[in-house]
Image (tube, coloured by chain):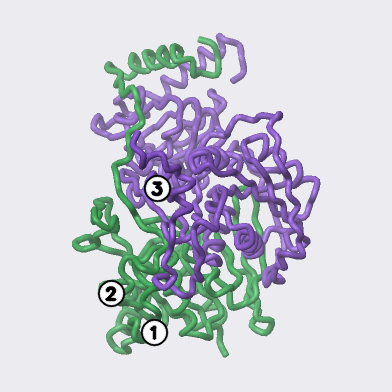
Amino acid sequence: MSLKVVVGIKWVPNTQAVRFDPKTGTLIREGVPSIVNPHDLDAVELALQLKERYGAKVTAISMAPPSAIKGLEHVIGMGIDDAILVSDRVFAGSDTLATSYVIAQTLKRIGDFDLALFGQETIDSSTAHIPAQVAGWLELPYMYYVDRVEEVDEKQRTVTVRRMLEDRLEWYQLKMPAILGVAMKSQKPRPVSIYNKLRVRMENPIQVWSNKELGLDPRCLGLKGSPTLVSKVTWTPEVPRKKQVIEGPPSEAVKKLVEKLCEEGVLPFEC
Amino acid sequence: MSAEKKVSLAEKRRQKKVDCDKLCPEWGCAQPYEYEGVWVVGEVDEQGITEPSLQMLTPARRIADKLETFVEGILLGSDREQLEKAAKEMIYHGADRVRILVSEELATYIPGVYGEAIARLAEARKPEVIFLAATMRGREIAPYVAGLLKAGITADCTQFEVDEETGDLLMIRPPFAAILLAYIKTPFRRPQIATARPNIFPLPPRDESREGEIVWENPEDYKLSKPPISLVKVEMLKRSEVPIEKAEYIVSGGRGVGTKEGFKTLEELAEILGGVVAGSRKAVDLGLIPHERQVGQTGKSVRPKLYIAVGISGAAQHVIGIREAGLVVAINKDPDAPIFKNADYGIVADWREALPILIEELRKLKERSGKTG
């Protein structure tokens, strides 16, 4: 049996123009163009390397509205074998715990995976919650900030990974199945190939699962299944700053600036 | 004062009741009033307790006082002596009590095992709130704890408040772009778990006369599962530079600096000030600086005495990282760049022109003062 790898994909709005529903405090996604979370592409790339090294079969999963099918087509274009879009209105408004629950249950239904890879965080909320929460639901070993898979031992069912913290490199060996958060910008995600993109049309490799397939209790889903809720949204208060623009040609302005810095007493030497 | 207002928050939160039938059955059910106290999980490394975890005692103390409850430090590990020292530091910095779990399983850091230990302790002791510093390890453990406890968690909070009506913790974070703040609460679920990035909160004052109890938890009560992970090896990285979150002087560059060559000029300035070079997300995306030197929402929060932003436009996501900076100077050739609205002093000029002059002026000053920066 060959190695089976699952990659989690988040379909995120690609814009700085945020709009919120003031009632629920959740994002309004309509009208905002979306992309695959760029950090997930590092996970996709790492998974594809495992495909090359170990002949792994790689499945992408995404819990998202139907439009995310475009994102799954994109990663299939990169070389992912097949994909499951987990999509249902009852999932709307999920916080990270409710999202991780659905993803964990999806993994359970997939069943025989060895590794589940996720981007370390997303560009839209950057909580970095999902990989560890999924591990929490499934009580599986997990590791964050992985930048390299050193070795997969299919007989012993272990994976050895490297990760970088602030001041050290660490190598860990995890029993599979295991969950990995792939470090941001740790890989060079490959481009989409036309050949792979054609597969989307020819082979129809994307399945859609709704809650009909998963059969989960609605109390565990969406807003109901989310222990956290947004009670209100406000503007970030500004930090009071002097906002003084020093006029004049650069040489004069810089001299004036140095005088100001002296007055403020912030320089590490006497003026 | 109306009569209603005399009901203390402590009482209000004891009156809170949750309808278990409405909750996800996978969560289990407990009443909020069964939970008491604010926890801070202490992170301990070779040098002892880390500063970011002591910083979390600042919001913990404030929230505990509002809720009329106590602050407990939580420490995990295998070295009793080191942990006791760390416990005393937590008490000096504001903890009322510190619980320590010593176990051989905790001798090396394994996220799943540390997370499991915190979750088991929380199940037994039922804290109302758990704070963790969002260090790399904290960000790794906190969501696992939440996943095990099926509890609500909010990452990277920048403020905490208490809902005056219900006694719920309000976990406040910039949800998407840093221009907005979301007030998040977790009304039906305890503990309420939250993290904050290092330097968002100041270190509380250290008071060696503060006293507190140290409780050595019985490891027999917390059988940890044999970890399906092992640490194979560690390689310490030689980092000559001061980490940006500890620097007093930061010269920071953005897209406008453009090249690695350009950053050399920034380094020159930083060296005169005895500071370090950092950058915006754009600078990281362009490969000009490593991610650990990124300032902003997806990077780090810094609190230097002086922050000099060079060629940085000043998007909200960047500015949020310098809220705690002392004085902010901006150099940018675009007079409309938002950074000028978030700076104390600004110069509208090409940095290639302005920076060499600044370097020259400061060098003269430094030599005259005869001090080494």
The answer to which image quadrant residue A259 occupies is: top left
Element on which disc 1 rests: loop
Element on which disc 3 rests: strand
| Real-space Cα separation, disc 3 to disc 2, in angstroms | 26 Å
Element on which disc 2 rests: helix
Q: In the image, what residue occupies the spot 53% across and 53% down?
A: B128
Which residue matches tag 1? A215
Residues flagged by tags 2 and 1 on a common chain: yes
Which residue matches tag 2? A89
Give me the chain letter of mark 3: B
- Asked if A44 appears above or below B41 in the picture, the reply is below
Q: In the image, what residue occupies the spot 49% across and 82% down?
A: A108
Q: In the image, what residue occupies the spot 40% across and 32% down?
A: B309
Residue B100 on image: x %, y %: 72, 52
Q: Is residue A146 visible?
A: no
Q: Is residue A47 visible?
A: yes
Which residue matches tag 3? B173
